[in-house]
Image (cartoon, rainbow, N blue to C red):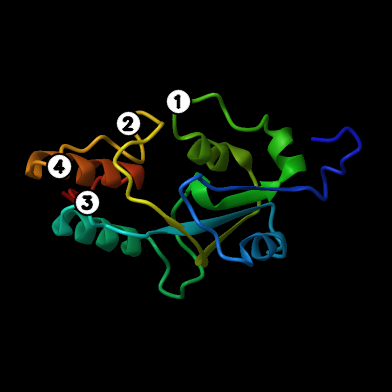
Amino acid sequence: MWPDANLARTWYATTDADSRVDPDWLVRQMVADADMVLGVVRVAAWRHVPTWVAGRYLHRYRSKSGSDRAGHNHVHGANMGFLAEKYWKVGGFAALPSGEDVDLVEQSGFHIRRDASLSVVTSARHDGRANGFAAPKIDRSGIPAARGLCNLMANLHRSTDGLC
């Protein structure tokens, strides 16, 4: 941040190193007339994940999206943006091992726009940097590991409905 930056006009956007954003991604966030914009993610390739796990995940993910494609209930650090002024007012991201994006949304008091048409492509990688969160180490040998991945995905979306 530059010392003379106007925080009221500065927009921060976050994504992941293994994600791809659309060419108009940043512009669409900035013109949304909100303090924060939350988009969705879509997985590029499921080839290393059993079909039933991908199917259950997609079913659950879609069930938390609005029928009008405008709203959704997801929070992804891979697809969010916010006004710098509001971000610094609440102290920024908390120093958490994972889930700092969800924490920011829950404690922010931001005027939030949730846009299901604003999506980024992300991977279904097996090795992640945040323990116990988006990308577990998966044993490719069988169902117990796949069931663990399905449960993890359900937890990511705060599911308690017996998805797996």
- Give the residue number, with chain letter if any, for mark 2: 132
Residue that carries the numbered disc 1 in the rendered image:
97
Contact, mark 1 vs mark 2 (Cβ under 8 Å): yes
Q: Do the residues under discs 3 and 4 have CB atoms within 8 angstroms?
A: yes
In the structure shown, which secondary structural element does the residue marked by tag 3 occupy?
loop
Labels 1 and 4 touching (C-beta < 8 A)? no
Lower sequence index among marks 1 and 2? 1
Circle nearer the N terminus (3, 1): 3
Q: Earlier in the sequence, mark 3 or mark 4?
A: 3
Q: Which residue is mark 4?
A: 140
Kind of residue at disc 3: His
How many residues crowd around disc 4 within 10 Å: few (fewer than 14), some, or many (20 or more)? few
* Residue for badge 3: 48
Mark 2 is on which residue type? Gly
Task: Indicate the position of residue 17 as horizontal and vertical percent values.
Answer: 50, 44
The kind of secondary structure element at disc 4 is loop
